[in-house]
Image (cartoon, rainbow, N blue to C red):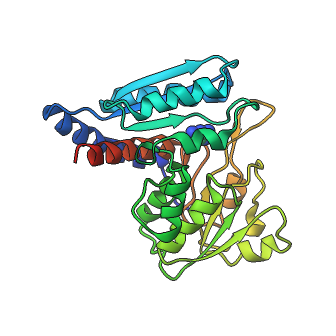
Amino acid sequence: MTAPIINGKQVSEEIRAGIRDQVNELKADGFQPGLAVVLVGEDPASQVYVRNKEKACHDLGFYSEVHRLSAETSQEELLALVDKLNRQDNIHGILVQLPLPKYIEEKAVIDAIAVEKDVDGFHPVNVGNLVIGDDSLLPCTPAGVIELIKRTGIEMAGKHAVVIGRSNIVGKPVSLLLQRENATVTMCHSRTSNMKELALQADILVVAIGRANFIDAGYVKPGAVVIDVGMNRLDNGKLAGDVDFEAVKDVAGPITPVPGGVGPMTITMLMQNTLIAAKRACG
Ligand code: GUN
């Protein structure tokens, strides 16, 4: 039996429609949520991501500022901009696009963003709130993963979820969010010796290791939900996930494709976080 494909683009559009309505209501009351995006340098992938964020702001009615800074920008200059945005009343969310040039210390920049405007959910206070289960701005890609699993209608409580990858941006926060949904979570990473054995026990398998087509059918329990967070550019220019979709789709239950699965959700959750931050700011 072929698995149902989870349509991240469609889910994303549904959530965006709700966000657009809420933004319109706020605007009718004279209040417009605003997002500032900062890009340092000319990394081609980052340029595309930033353009897509700018477009999402425009489509959903947010005020947006994009600050494109040269690759020679100093850490002090970047911190001064973050400080200015922290104090700007028309900006409710700040996102500094990563990676930053090598000579800028990422942690210093993330730490400088006001906690209540940290729509990436990367600030240590927001990460801490996530760990202890307090209401916080959740990191976008992990929040998108959970939303997609919820929309399959498959209950997470009591299930065994296996997360492959332990990055700060995806693996670690996804595992915390799955625990919050009462799943039993196992984390695997590059040094896990029995990864296949563990993955085969997963009712829900989330893969974020950054290796194209790494997960084949031999890692997947029949009927398991498979969420592929990978975005790998192949030599032929095509985009590939961490899961070999063609091989796995005949074994898995609901499964995300790449592109069109988790990818479209990330910016949608960013817009949702900006809306949440804006609503908190206007009381
Ligand atoms: N670069 C790649 N993904 C992300 C993200 O989610 N947030 C930021 N700030 N930079 C990124």
- In the rendered structure, the answer to whether residue 116 lies left or right of residue 261 reads left
Residue at 48% x, 63% y is 129
Residue at 68% x, 48% y is 241
- In the rendered structure, the answer to whether residue 92 lies left or right of residue 5 reads left
Residue 9 on image: x %, y %: 46, 43
- In the rendered structure, the answer to whether residue 254 lies left or right of residue 197 reads left
* In this view, 193 is above or below 112: below
- Whether residue 118 can be seen here: yes
Instruction: State the quadrant of the N terminus.
Output: bottom right
* In this view, 153 is above or below 245: below
Q: Nearer the viewer, residue 184 or 42?
A: 42
Residue at 54% x, 79% y is 159
Residue 133 on image: x %, y %: 46, 69
Residue at 45% x, 48% y is 115
Q: Nearer the viewer, residue 92 or 169?
A: 92
Q: Residue furthest bottom?
A: 158
